[in-house]
Amino acid sequence: MIPALKSFADRFLGRGDATITVPSFDGALKPNQILEQAETITQLEAPEDLATDGTSLYIADGPALLRLEGKGTTEVRRFDRAISALCCLPDGCLAVALEGREVRVFRTPSAEATTIFSDATFNAINALAPGPSGTLLATDGSATRPTSQWGHDLMERGRSGRVLRLELESGRVTTLASGLQYAFGVCMAGEALLVSESWRHRVLALSADGGRRAVLDHLPVYPSRLSSAPSGGFWLTAFAARTLLVEFVLRENAYRRRMMKEIDPEYWIAPKLRSGLSFLEPMQGAHIKTMGVVKPWAPPRSYGLVIRLSEAGVPLYAVHSRVDGLNHGIVAAVEMDGALYALAKGPRRLLRAPLGMIEKELQA
């Protein structure tokens, strides 16, 4: 009863979760253009996720599993469905999620599957990570929408995301957390799990007893996949940035439902992985451009961001592709061989930024 009354009061007074304010990029999230200066390694068809075992980099590109070879890629194998998530396990195995509905584990990338998880409840498996003692962790973003319709889930204010534990030996699937507002990323952090909850703009720590604690809250972005950094800590990606206009629309139920019913999803007032391609887009004009030049501080319909977190989950710094850039929609990032590799889904690029270059730019 008390939470319900608090929720009603927040909506009436416009405070708490009902507020439409958006935090600014400040402090450790101070804007820069490091992702725009990153090297484009290769152009892809339909990039989705990255995974590394420390020596090789694997890329999910539609139904194709690719491996980075020098400045190009080699196709390792091809599936009958699009890959929605990738993960390298400590024992050398590779886990692959297909269209969010099935997870397969391979002893080697080119071998036959040793374990197949095809639980009927799987709907939007969008991230995988190694778990403790022979387990695999997964986030199932939504029980009602597939991974390709994440924008629909946001506009419907979905809260059906889950965190799952998959046992490799027995094939058992256990739900560790449910009722999340789009779970999109998971990673081990000691005895706890870090989980991205995109529509709540936060990263949660899940304890072994099921407790939840916000490690990062009130982010100015929609957080997504997490990966461990070899030197300790984590890399957190954000596939889009928040705006006051979207926050307002999310609270105007009648307008939002009519927009979803009558307008093509491509032109909804909603975050996108890329923007500036059509005169039909809802955010354009003088508040985006001045004298024909896109303002880097304009409201971001699309954005690119990777945040470096400490072992405690505290932001240390971030690398950006701002509104006037192209490398937007960062959905995955991993560190390998002294460089940060990031997947920009908007322009369909694999980016590489040496850590030395990042440090130099941050100190400039």
Image (cartoon, rainbow, N blue to C red):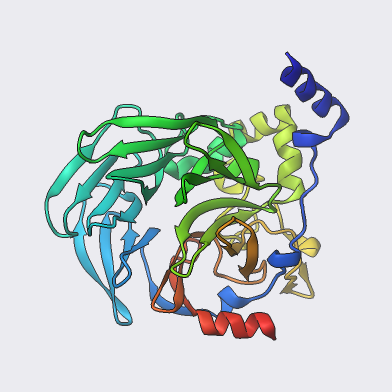
Tell me: 106 left or right of 90.
left
Residue 14 picture quarter: top right
Question: Outermost residue toward the left?
Answer: 112
Q: Nearer the viewer, residue 183 or 207?
A: 207
Left or right, 32 with respect to 357, comes to right
Q: Can residue 101 be seen here?
A: no
- Whole-percent x and y of residue 148? 44, 44
Quadrant where the C terminus lies?
bottom right
Q: Position of residue 312 (x, y in %)?
A: 59, 56
Q: In which quarter of the view is residue 36 placed?
A: bottom right
Residue at point 75%, 70% (across, down): 295
Q: Which corner quadrant holds the N terminus?
A: top right
Name the residue at 48% across, 55% down: 226
How many numbered tags mark residues here? 0
| Residue 83 vertical position relative to residue 156 in the rendered view, above or below | below
In this view, which residue lies farthest toward the top? 1
* Residue 361: percent from left, percent from top: 63, 83
Comparing 8 with 175, the one in front is: 175
From the viewer's perspective, is residue 59 above or below residue 215? below
Point 73% across, 21% down: residue: 3
x and y, in percent, of residue 279 in the image = 65, 58
Residue most extreme to the right: 13
Residue 144 visible in the snapshot: yes
Please give left or right for residue 168 compared with residue 224 in the image: left
